[in-house]
Image: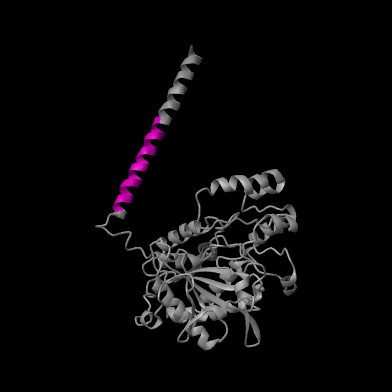
Amino acid sequence: MAEKAKIRLGTLSVVKKSILLFIAFLLAIKTGIIFGDFFYNSENENIERVDVETFRSTLNITLPVIETIYNSGSISLSFSGQLRSIIKTIFHFDLGYPITVLNAQSPYFHSFYINGYNAYLNQGETYEPYVYIADLDIDENERENDFPNIESSITYNSEEDENDNKGDSEKNAVTIGDIAINNYETDFHIDVEKIMETPLKLNSHKKGPKVLIYHTHTTESFITELEQLEQSGIPNRTTDATNNVVRVGEELAQILRKKYNIEVIHNSTVHNYPSDTGAYGRSLNTASNILTSYPSIQIVIDIHRDGMDGKKLRTVTEIDGKKAAKIMFVVGTNATGLEHPEWRENLKLAITLQSMLDERYPGLTRPIYISKNRYNQHLSKGALIVEIGGDGNLISECLESTKYLAEVINEVLN
């Protein structure tokens, strides 16, 4: 009996402790709510008095890793990124994309995912109706014959460019004054003088990041040697951030930060893996969230590289004895009916940057391309697609171009 009594007392003790802990837990939550309401209360304005940018800058100085994480997005130029690359080379899957583990282990699953499941997911999606195969261990003949080899967000028909050995389509440009504009996709009348009557609506005085760089077609890549221009079956997409547009975006970001002291957010979230279908919808979500968090951002750049149907597109010039990839600004409009009433503000920014580059570095730019598509540029009055080079350029040529682009971005902001 004594033993049973002890057990009952022990059980009651456990129950009482549990009840007390539960009550303490509820009190803690209630206390947190009360203090949270107090500090967030608009009358006290305690939250408003916190200078978030100063606080973050202090953390950056104290813990440099904070700055790295803050600016990185999912940039894979770090040691961990290189480690992932080595694992991918050895085992043919990418730790950043778990689906590739199954794809690499089972050809049947890979086939189903690309041809069945992926198609099912994309039902009803019409924004970019095409699919590409990422750089898994696929036979080159299979890649070339069975899957479309999509070049770029902006492509040119080979017949239109048969008289242009560089495939630049520069002969098709409309010249208005000193500005060359390709406006064959829309019926809009472009009055450059009227557009440039008023200054750019940029406010660089807000504290915080001024430039956002991201990539809708994150895996667009380049050739690694000039001999590949004459070879067939050379992949034009890769998840290796050291040889795709992410590397170009990071170079631009670093120059803006280090040389011009401009705060930049470079986000390299992969929006087009394993398919380009829906990429602009995914990048819209990424860019929208960043702009909501950082209203100080004035210029939004979606960096791509160009391409052409049927052959590699190489756009290059020489500046101070060095090869530099040509730059093309792409301006989206509301020609398809999507809301984008102030697209001419984006065109004004493109014209401003183009004019500066043309004056200082003749031959570096290609005609501004006005598209019927919106390309997420309704998010900002300073949003552009910037095509740096093509899939026939070396990445070194594209990196060379970023220093000239950074120079004129700095002047526009300051």
Eyeballing the image, is 178 above or below 111?
below
Main SS of the magenta segment? Answer: helix
Eyeballing the image, is 112 above or below 396?
above
In this view of the protein, can residue 407 be seen by the observer? Answer: yes
Check the image and tell me how it is coloured: one colour
Foreground residue among 233 and 274: 233
Task: Give how far across and how far down residue 9 sits, in percent.
Answer: 44, 21
177 lies left or right of 104? left
Foreground residue among 406 and 54: 406
Residue 35 is one of the magenta-drawn residues = yes
Residue 148 is one of the magenta-drawn residues = no
- Residue drawn at (39%, 32%), measured in percent from left and top? 20
342 lies left or right of 232? left
Residue reaching furthest to the left = 43
Foreground residue among 228 and 91: 228
Please state, as top left, top right, bottom left or bottom right, where the C terminus lies in the image.
bottom left
126 lies left or right of 17? right
Residue reaching furthest to the top = 1
Eyeballing the image, is 19 above or below 280?
above
Instruction: Give, as a single range, the part of the protein colored magenta.
Output: 19-38
Task: Give how far across and how far down residue 319 sits, in percent.
Answer: 61, 86
Total of numbered circles in the picture? Answer: 0
In this view of the protein, can residue 86 be seen by the observer? Answer: no
Task: Give how far across and how far down residue 22 sits, in percent.
Answer: 40, 34
Task: Give how far across and how far down residue 273 sits, in percent.
Answer: 59, 55
